[in-house]
Amino acid sequence: MKIKRFEKLLDQYGWDLNSWPTSCRKDANKLLEDDAEAAELLRSLKSVEDLLENDSLPMGKHQAVDDIFAEIDEQET
């Protein structure tokens, strides 16, 4: 699995690989073992979702996550 595919699956299914299609899990776990960037992406997404878990904002989690990452991207550029 390539990192771009992993990112798309993270966006689609979230950080918990148990919610991913069975056919993707083995490749994702292998990538996580071999690629520090993939492991960091997973940890980062889990951290954000953990922070948002108790968030009382009325917007959905996906929109809030998108807003947070957009702000991070903006600050880095």
Image (spheres, rainbow, N blue to C red):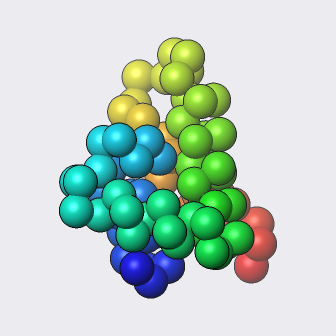
User: Picture coordinates of residue 26 (x, y %)?
Assistant: 37, 62
In the picture, measured across the screen, residue 53 lies left or right of residue 77, that is: left
User: Picture coordinates of residue 48 (x, y %)?
Assistant: 61, 41
Quadrant location of the N terminus in the rendered image:
bottom left
Quadrant location of the C terminus in the rendered image:
bottom right
Q: Is residue 2 above or below residue 13?
A: below
State the residue at coordinates (41%, 58%).
10
Q: Is residue 64 visible?
A: yes
Question: Quarter-wise, where is residue 4 in the image?
Answer: bottom left
In the picture, measured across the screen, residue 73 lies left or right of residue 30, that is: right
Q: Nearer the viewer, residue 21 or 60?
A: 21
Q: How many marks?
A: 0
Q: Is residue 71 above or below residue 58?
A: below
Q: Going by the picture, which residue comes out furthest to the right?
A: 76
Q: Is residue 32 above or below residue 2?
A: above
State the residue at coordinates (65%, 51%).
44
Q: Is residue 74 visible?
A: no
User: Picture coordinates of residue 43 (x, y %)?
Assistant: 64, 50
State the residue at coordinates (39%, 69%).
27
User: Picture coordinates of residue 55 (x, y %)?
Assistant: 55, 21
Q: Nearer the viewer, residue 16 or 44?
A: 16
Q: Nearer the viewer, residue 62 or 4?
A: 4
